[in-house]
Amino acid sequence: MSATSAVPLAAINGVVKMFTTSQSYLDCSKVKETKSLMSDLCRQFYNLGWVSGTAGSITIKVHEDSIPKPQQLVVNVMSPSGVQKERMMEDDMYVLSPSGPVLSEPLTKPWPHKPPKCSDCGPLILKADEMRNAGAVIHSHMMESCLVTMINPSSKEFRITHMEMIKGIQGHGYYDELVIPIIENTAHERELTESLAEAIKAYPKTTAVLVRNHGIYIWGDSGISAKTQAECYHYLFDAAIKLNQLGLDWSTLAHGPIHSPNGFFKCHKNAKVSPKAGNFSSSNVIESSRRCIVLDIEGTTTPISFVTDVLFPYARDSVGKHLELTYNTEETQDDIKLLRAQVQEDLEYGVIGAVPIPSDGEKEEVIAALVANVEAMIKADRKITSLKQLQGHIWRTGFQRNELESVIFDDVPEALEKWHALGIKVYIYSSGSRLAQRLLFGYTNYGDLRKYLCGFFDTTVGNKKETNSYIQITESLGVDNPSDILFVTDVYQEATAAKAAGLEVIISIRPGNGPLPENHGFPTITSFSDI
């Protein structure tokens, strides 16, 4: 059965043209190809155990180059009663308009089949599609996606890091921490729509939401992207379950033994560090004998918003002009050389946003390609030396021209002055280049603070989420014991890596910082005055 409905065809000169969805269009090759793909995926997913017992759902938009993605038709498998996924045929599928109304639905089959109907998960799939402009959404009931939400019934997130398959998740790399929100299940699936929307909004980087004791919703730019990510998610869930069975903590950088009385969960008390609270003696936080303090910048000494809302946009908007004016200088040619090497690696690994840089093209072509790559790197918040070096050179111009002034938390200057007076050496370790660090502390809203700092470390010593980086810093500072160094950061993975190297660690909690894992086990501060 089919319905006739007006659906946007294409936007021309800003005006959206409409056409009537006729039976001939619903029977066209594009719709048939998408239905055929859906049928094939249903069988594959059934064999993987993702959609057994008629459960689960898949949606893929009918791709038409002339139609903007938000207005493309949706071919939707909505678990019609009595139709098992491994036996799903093209005639068993619904076709929906972008706003949700059914344009074509399956025919009723004879007994013992029941009349077809869209399942309760329809509103959730359309909500994910609406909020993320997805090209495809997969709803899986695979056992592993249920079990990882049950291991710790109070957890609101699934976190894992330093696993190769994380690279298969959009916007993530090996060193990144993958964070997936977990929402609570309800008796009727449609009642999950609001909590799913809240999770998507609260976790802008996520491409999935777990439903406790139920399954997972995964989306991507296309059917291939959603399928690839679904495979990676389920691999990671399986790995986490097996690591847990071995008594290993999948959420930490080293995947070391789980520390808990019963050997199952890591359940440390997340105590706040405050002299008034009396939770810690002074020796737990910083002693007068402490020789060095190493500080992170973003979210520790400086608001994250200053970096994301001021520094990054300035670099992004100025990169083309900067390259044009300085193209033939030795410094910029070195920047371009580093970017070429990084982009070549990105292309080999299929990193989203990477575009080839002409090796013998005209200056304008090279700059255009460089700008496209830098914009993609900034958007993805890549912590890579090639990007950070170029950003430092761009920011130098901005600070020197008084177009930029860095923002430091109010408690930082007083603390730096106090530590300097006590003879405690203070260093900075940031993913930004050393040049950018010196600029940030040299041109602050409190004046030049570099006189209180003894040195700067950047990613040339290693990634901030790698234990070896902190070993290198320890050796550079020449302390007798790594515990002579106090490291302050807002990032859990960095804290874990530094602790594994033997450093004392405190996590900084500031306005705008990202969420921390529950029961993370590190002392925390909200101000340097607490140290």
Image (cartoon, grey):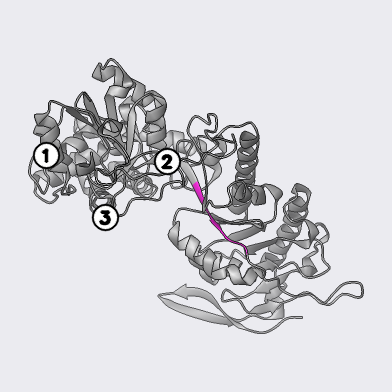
Distance in Å between CA atoms under marks 2 and 3: 28 Å
Residue position for label 2: 356
Residue position for label 3: 309
Which is the main secondary structure of the residues drawn in magenta?
A: strand
Q: Amino acid at mark 3?
A: Asp
Q: Position of residue 104 (x, y in %)?
A: 71, 77
Q: Position of residue 278 (x, y in %)?
A: 29, 42
Q: Residues within 10 Å of mark 3 (few under 14, many from 20)?
A: few
* Residue ID at (12%, 28%): 422
* Residue ID at (28%, 26%): 485
Q: Are marks 1 and 3 in contact (CB under 8 Å)?
A: no
Q: Position of residue 211 (x, y in %)?
A: 60, 58
Q: Amino acid at mark 1?
A: Gly
Image quadrant holding the N terminus, namely bottom right
Quick one: label 2 or label 3, which is nearer the N terminus?
3
Magenta stretch encompasses residue 315? no
Q: Nearer the observer, disc 2 or disc 3?
A: 3
Q: Amino acid at mark 2?
A: Pro
Distance in Å between CA atoms under marks 2 and 1: 36 Å
Residue furthest front as drawn = 278
Q: Which residues are magenta?
A: 179-185
Which is nearer the eye, 454 or 401? Answer: 454
Residue position for label 1: 442
